[in-house]
Image (cartoon, coloured by chain):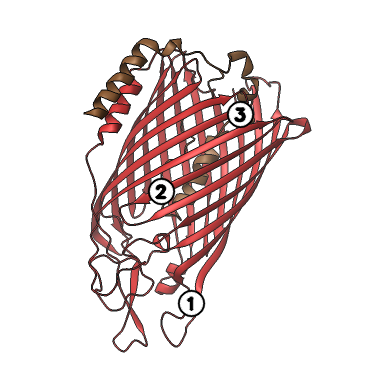
Chain colours: A red, B brown
Amino acid sequence: MAPRVGTVVAVGVTRHIPAWLVGTALLCCSLAVLAGVLPDDRADALYHSYDGGGVEITGPSLMVLKKLGQNVAVNGNYYVDSISSASIDVVTSGASAYSEDRIEFSGGVDYLHGNSIMSLSFTNSSEDDYEANTAGFGISMDMFGNMTTVSMGYSRGWDMVMNNLDSTFSRDADRQNYKLGLTQVVTKDMLLELNYEGITDEGFLNNPYRSVRYLDPGGDSYSYESEIYPNTRTSNAVAIRSIYYLPYRAAVSGEYRFFDDTWGIDAHNLKFVYTHPLQGGWVLEGNYRYYTQNAADFYSDLFPFQGAQNFLARDKELSTFSSHTIGFKLSYDFIKNGWRSIDKGKINLAWDHILFDYDDFRDLRVVTPAPGDEPLYSFSADVVQLYVSIWF
Amino acid sequence: MRLCAFYLLLIALSLTGCSSIEPWVKPYERAHLADPIMNFDRDPVSGAYMTHVYQAREAARGAEGGHGGGCGCN
């Protein structure tokens, strides 16, 4: 809910690492005793397509994972988003539809030592007006007779935000991620996974193009001014997942995640997946996901006057909304028993349909006599993935 | 202080006694857990893409999983 007239929103951030996190890190480091396993060599080629809300995004993603000897594995990923956008933000701001590409390269090394796998990773993402670099370190360990896997990770990101309308504009945004994970064998048919991730951001965190609207004096029209976000944000997310093997060779999994941050946003999501192998190497999968969040403290669809608060947002991603996703995936093993140097090959087609319903973000394409009476915005999106995976 | 003592105790236990914990699911009982359909993240390239799709449109972020872990069935 947006603060009332004249309210000052203050958002802080905790930057020190909590003692429990340090303690858990030491605990994890002391548990390296038994034997871990590096993932199998594989390559994936994926074509993705997103179409919804006036935005179309397509592109490839290519990933290779290869062992070098017994203890080292390297991986690389090349990913492209080709974006064509006439979203509601673009249309209602009076700007023209635009196209741009985002290209991402990432690479990593895994090193197996005893029961521990240590990982280093680096990612670079480039757009015309955004450059992001992230470096990360992680460690995971199998323990207690391989019944338990504990993992933890830290990564740091250095982003640069630019503005295509102002060549002199350049701002930094830095980010730190702390991850903890635990996977537990519960029974011979059930696994449980717990994950925590804390993220801190500092720097220029808003979109330099986006505006908020406010009522003009008299209240029968509105104008725009630039968004202003706090320059810090800290968030926490905790998730629990479980997967269960059904008696007739099928699997059902469920997950719940809770999220909160220092901008006043709480979010919950639930997901269920059912996986059903068919005869002849076919696998059918269905999933349902529900997501809900409340708005940031400094969000409003319509501010009462210009400069009503020290922080201002009208980004629909910071509004109160919910979404439902229903999806299906069909996979086929086209190489089951090896062919030349390929051990196994699989082709997959996945389709997800997402419905977004906003509770306090209005559709300004509809003109009403009084500002604030426009209908609430909603839209749906289709996400399609076609990909081939080979193990070699 | 109590937290420090708790972690020191856990670290000491892990250094000395974790291998003595008896697994209640034996290695030969893990055939179902080793089945590819029991993997939380069977296709990492697809999982990473869907995480990106949601993160770009939602305020929530983090703890998506699918980055390591396993079933201990190897």
Which residue is the extreme one toward the right? Answer: A279
Q: Are marks 3 and 1 on the same chain?
A: yes
Q: CA distance from mark 3 to mark 1?
A: 47 Å
Mark 2, residue position: A259
Residue B4 occupies quadrant: top left
Mark sitting earlier along the chain (3/2)? 2
The N terminus of chain A is located in which quarter? bottom left
Mark sitting earlier along the chain (3/1)? 1
In the drawing, does residue A254 fall left or right of residue A100? right
Dot 2, crowdedness within 10 Å: few (<14), some or many (≥20)?
many
Mark 3, residue position: A390
Circle on res. A365: 1
Residue depth check, mark 3 versus mark 2: number of the one nearer the observer: 2
- The x, y position of residue B52, in whole percent, is 47, 47
Circle on res. A375: none
The C terminus of chain A is located in which quarter? top right
Residue A382 occupies quadrant: bottom right
Q: Are marks 3 and 2 on the same chain?
A: yes
- The x, y position of residue A283, in whole percent, is 70, 36
Residue A364 against residue A141 in the figure, above or below: below
Residue B29 against residue A331 in the figure, above or below: above
Q: CA distance from mark 3 to mark 2?
A: 35 Å
Q: Are marks 2 and 1 on the same chain?
A: yes
Q: Amino acid at mark 3?
A: Ile
Q: Is residue A114 visible?
A: no
Q: Amino acid at mark 1?
A: Arg
Q: Amino acid at mark 2?
A: Phe
- The x, y position of residue B70, in whole percent, is 51, 26
Q: Is residue A188 visible?
A: yes
